[in-house]
Image: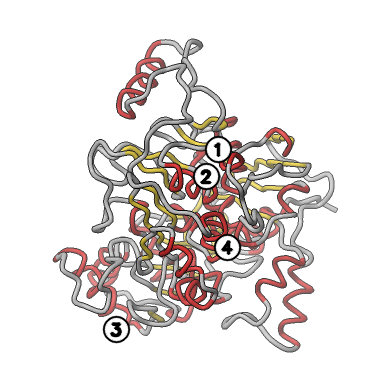
Amino acid sequence: MEKKTLFDKIWDAHVVKSVEKGPDVLFIDKHFIHEVTSPVAFLNLEKRGNTVLFPERTIATPDHNVPTEGQEQTIKDKLSRMQVERLRENCRKYGIELHDLGSEHHGIVHVIGPELGVTQPGMTIVCGDSHTSTHGAFGAIAFGIGTSEVEMVFASQCIMQAKPKKMRITIDGELGEGVTSKDIILYVISKISASGGTGYFLEYAGSAITSLSMEARMTICNMSIEMGARGGLIAPDETTFAYLKGKKYSPSGKAWDDAVAYWKSLKTDEGADFEVEHHFDAADIEPMITYGTNPGMGIKIKENIPTGADLLGSNKKSYQQALDYMGFQAGEPIKGKKVDYVFVGSCTNGRIEDIRAVANFVKGKQKAENITAWIVPGSKEVEKLAHEEGLVDILKAAGFELRQPGCSACLAMNDDKIPAGKYAVSTSNRNFEGRQGPGARTLLASPLTVAAVAITGVITDPRELAVADYAGV
């Protein structure tokens, strides 16, 4: 009997047709859409005289360019307002479920999908957004698609895709004090590089991965795309099942029992082949931070910025350009650098466990005067829990500003931009030039590191400050 990887099992079960020496026609279980990539797809769909084949398989929410203040008012930015209005119109026209601004389940698309139980093991999931890989944490094949492909899924519920190669990343051992899932993935990307996963779909395995909560696993899979991979996934287990049980769209009764029985089969067979294998020791992972302009330019927070002495030609030139943009010098310590903004949020770290971790860290403390601190929940549900658990009171007392749900300062598509030349330590996923605003300088880190920076005003190792609770991040 053929030994299959988890990825192969899900992919092969969804192939409608294989094109000889070409791509597979892949059936898509769930399609998430938002206000940025869907309008043109809807327009082209209409021009061709097509309709949405299975509207019940599509879920919509506005998130990328919505304001995070005054959401109950009319959106001031004309383009943003137009995009949100088009999303509303198209959802009404085609009968698509919309979680709009102000609704109880509004939020970032990759946060609300798991919250609602829409995301389930064994599914194929797409969205016109690269960080769709987040949903792979549930043992699903999830990846981002372009506008023309969004239209293709609307019309046929299928997509044409070449089957990627497979890579397994195994991390065994126990994580040290103050080390979170964000540190794990920044560490892995620093080792493999920002292009090391190109052409592959990743599976994460090992005791350090299976010990993580679902929210922490989502952080890992979310940033698979930042090493060039098509996506990443983790085999479902009892942690997955416990998270999904009782969710709005999770099965119930006998259907639940049948689903779990199937989900338990979704694991890589022993002896199945991967084109590439990487193994890492959890004991070597420490709090991480980026210093350059791609997520692969990361170091342990206690280390100095690399000199780049081993680089040649254009690589050395681009390395120096990155340091010049960031205003850093090769070989100098990263610790102690002054920071202007901190941001906790995004589809990477905007979940309730992230906000709990920050609140536990800063409880009874006060942020530094030079720091502007933004906390942006990933959904209305996260916002609600933060209020109910008293986290908002703790954060406000420490000088943090809690905003309304949205992508916010992850990317410069809304009002939450970092000013030119200013430094922001961010829990988001990308540190490209201008990602958080023209001229903004972004350093990626975990919620705990962000909390430590907020308190001290400079880049700080969170292990050096008293921490109430590291759990769950």
Q: Tell me which label, 3 or 1, sits earlier in the chain.
A: 3
Q: Tell me which label, 4 or 1, sits earlier in the chain.
A: 4
Residue 70 vs 176, above or below: the answer is below
Instruction: Identify the residue under disc 3.
Output: 93
Which dot, 3 or 1, sits closer to the camera? 1
**Amino acid carrying mark 2 in the image:** Thr
What percent of the width, then of the height, locates residue 178? 64, 45
Secondary structure of the residue carrying tag 3 is: helix
What percent of the width, then of the height, locates residue 444? 45, 42
Secondary structure of the residue carrying tag 1 is: loop
The reply to whether discs 1 and 2 touch (Cβ–Cβ < 8 Å) is: yes
Give the side of residue 138 with respect to residue 227, left or right. Answer: right
Cα distance, mark 2 to mark 3?
A: 45 Å
Which dot, 2 or 3, sits closer to the camera? 2
Give the side of residue 403 with respect to residue 291, left or right. Answer: left
Q: Tell me which label, 4 or 3, sits earlier in the chain.
A: 3
Instruction: Identify the residue under disc 4.
Output: 353
**Amino acid carrying mark 1 in the image:** Asp
Which dot, 4 or 1, sits closer to the camera? 1
Instruction: Say which quadrant the C terminus sits in.
Output: bottom right
Q: Tell me which label, 2 or 3, sits earlier in the chain.
A: 3
**Amino acid carrying mark 4 in the image:** Glu
Tell me which corner region of the image, top left, top right, bottom left or bottom right, holds residue 70.
bottom left
Secondary structure of the residue carrying tag 4 is: helix
Residue 41 vs 421, above or below: the answer is below
Instruction: Identify the residue under disc 1.
Output: 461
Instruction: Identify the residue under disc 2.
Output: 449
Residue 25 visible in the picture:
no
Q: Which mark is residue 107?
A: none
